[in-house]
Image: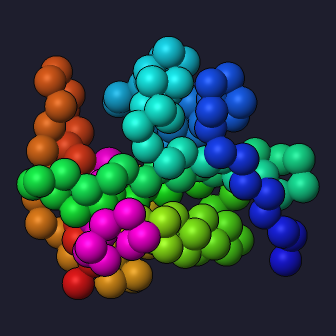
Amino acid sequence: MTALRYVRVHGDIGAADWMRVHNAVIPTAPLALDEVRGNAALRVMEVAYADDVLVGNSTVRPPTDDEPATVIVRVLPEHRRQGYGARLFARALEQGREIGDGTVQTVVLESNDDGLRFALAHGFVEVERYLLDDDTIPFVTLRLA
């Protein structure tokens, strides 16, 4: 299996590729490059490459008073079902557990059947669905059981 190379998003480093993956997987809530840069200052955000080919990204949001650490992994559709998501997920899950109390959650766009199936297969259970302003497809929050 091809090794993955991870690049942490910092300033312009990795930001455009992170945005490309996010916007491809979450077309209902696209982010601009400035938003990605701003988020990277507050979160652990990485892009993953197989050789030099972009395959996915991850985000680890620190816990808040109301929510545990949030771990989100996105894999471009053409690179799914090849083990990349599992490796990205294991890395991000470890990061999420390190910055929180061990409890983690994830968020998946409802229309992302592959992402929902992956989360459920890895022990997450649904706790909430919500819509962003002006959206028609909800996001699903799942917590690790």
To which quarter of the image does residue 27 belong? top left
Q: Residue at x 49, y 73 (%)?
A: 94
Q: Residue at x 50, y 34 (%)?
A: 40
Q: Position of residue 41 (x, y in %)?
A: 47, 32
Q: Give the magenta range.
A: 97-111
Q: Residue at x 72, y 47 (%)?
A: 7
Q: Position of residue 134 (x, y in %)?
A: 16, 21
Q: Quadrant of the N terminus?
A: bottom right
Viewer-closest of 94 and 127 = 94
Q: Quadrant of the C terminus?
A: bottom left
To which quarter of the image does residue 125 belong? bottom left
Q: Is residue 86 above or below residue 30?
A: below
Viewer-closest of 117 and 41 = 41
Viewer-closest of 116 and 74 = 74
Left or right: where 32 falls relative to 135: right
Viewer-closest of 1 and 7 = 7
**Residue 57 makes an appearance in the image:** yes
Q: Is residue 89 magenta?
A: no
Q: Residue at x 22, y 62 (%)?
A: 68
